Amino acid sequence: MSSKYGSIYFSIIPSYAGFTDQLHQFSAFYKLGLSLEYKYVHTSFSSKRSNPPRLSFLEKVTGKIYDKAPSGIKAILSPLKLESAFDVYEFLGFNQYLNSINPKLKLLDLKIINIELSDELLEESNISSFDEIKKFVRIKSKIETDIDNRNLLVKFSLAGKRKRLFFLIHSSVSEFQDSLSLRSAYFKARELSPYKSIFKNRKIKILTHVRQGDVCVLETPWDTCIPLDSRRGDWLREYNKFEDIEPGDTLFRVADYYGFLKGLISCLGDDACSILCFSDGYKRALKLLELNLNESGMSAAQIGALKRSLKAYEKRSFEPFLSLKNSQCFIGESSKKLCRLIHSTITADIIITSNQQRMIQKLVSSYCSLDRPIVIVLYKGRMPDNKDIMPMDEERFIYASLHDPDYEHIVGKVVKLAGLMN
């Protein structure tokens, strides 16, 4: 939209969050801005939560050499780059692509208005539709009354909860109005920096994502259990056994994912599948305990005992996955493992995750097609609601009750994927 007072632009300022959460914000605000007929100006995204906090001198030097190298040399150096000055958005090709197709503006020529949106704001302002959101933005930015004759830049950002806000946007605008494809941008980045799949060829590619770190139940060497999901009222409380913990909707153990995967493979045929299991492991769980030492009631000696047992505990937890045919496990957090997870997610046939977290659902909504991969979301209790990510979430995701999975239905969906069962 433009007016006699000048052109109207918009940009998106993501909150401090992991990269998939920031992509979730981008998707919603991008649709909102385009629906108002504003022109998009890219502000580079960065996620400290998804990138290494600091780099060594050697890593910094490697990054600088890579940045100045010609494209042919970059292809050779790309593995070193991923291990050194890693930036998840550079790997995705996100900032590079959006900067290349959007206008560059001189801030001195712009009038800047910051607009923060949230579910709380919708409630306070009695906003209940997408049209009312657009009307609010127009009034807030004073577009209809501005007589400055300067170009206007509206900066969208999130200021609280967003489930209702994003549902209203996505349910009204299903696809980017300008046909922007982040998936195409990703594969364009891979042309400059190739990345080899770790799935086995000519197999059904199955990825299982087991989030644990900040949502797990940690078993101690003295045979007690501690829930470490801060969304729970009893987090940090020590229980004598797992069965004593109130199950809730998001309480999953590694064995839950394995049990479902094993059942699915028995239907597909174990030799037909290539299996990757990714997990952040338990290091973040220990960090949470250390940061909340007083509240947890644990002693420094107990924390030390947990640290010493961590490696053996992780190995014991994930050993069943390695017993499966054509299976690999990647446990822990690093730039290399994150790249493997992203690429494997984008190229998988089947993904198994849960409503314990929503990282994979957000990544799939941004970078995958509408039919592949098939995403199986395990749940306990109530069926999850991801309509703020995809309004037709029940068509895009298969919600499988962990206690009563419908393998026949799931395998039926898999069979429909061209070529998978030939």
Image (cartoon, grey):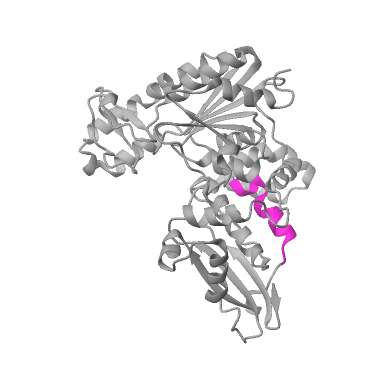
Q: Quadrant of the N terminus?
A: bottom right
The mark tally for this picture is 0
Which is more toward the observer, 25 or 164? Answer: 164
Residue 129 in the image: above or below residue 409: below
Q: Is residue 96 magenta?
A: yes
* Residue 169, horizontal then vertical, whole percent: 57, 57
Which percent across, then down, holds residue 17?
48, 51
Q: Can residue 174 be seen here? A: yes
Q: Quadrant of residue 270?
A: top right
Q: Is residue 154 left or right of residue 422?
A: left
Question: In this picture, is 199 found above or below 86?
Answer: above
Residue 236 position within the rendered picture, expressed as x and y whole percent measured from the top left? 27, 38
The answer, for residue 15, to whether it is visible in the render is no
Would you say 134 lies left or right of 248 here?
Answer: right
Based on the picture, tell me whether residue 314 belongs to the magenta stretch: no
**What are the residue bounds of the magenta stretch?**
87-103
The overriding secondary structure of the stretch rendered in magenta is helix
Classify residue 318 as left or right of residue 235. Answer: right
- Residue drawn at (49%, 66%), measured in percent from left and top? 116
| Closer to us: 311 or 393 | 393
* Image quarter of the C terminus: top right
Which of the pair 141/335 is nearer the observer? 141
Question: In front here: 12 or 52?
Answer: 12
Q: Please report the residue visible at 43 percent of the width from the left and 25 percent of the height from the top.
A: 254
Q: Residue at x 69, y 35 (%)?
A: 195
Extreme-bottom residue of the structure: 147
| Residue 377 image point, x, y percent | 51, 33
* Quarter location, residue 3: bottom right
Q: Residue at x 34, y 31 (%)?
A: 217
The relative height of residue 84 versus residue 225 in the rendered view (above or below) is below
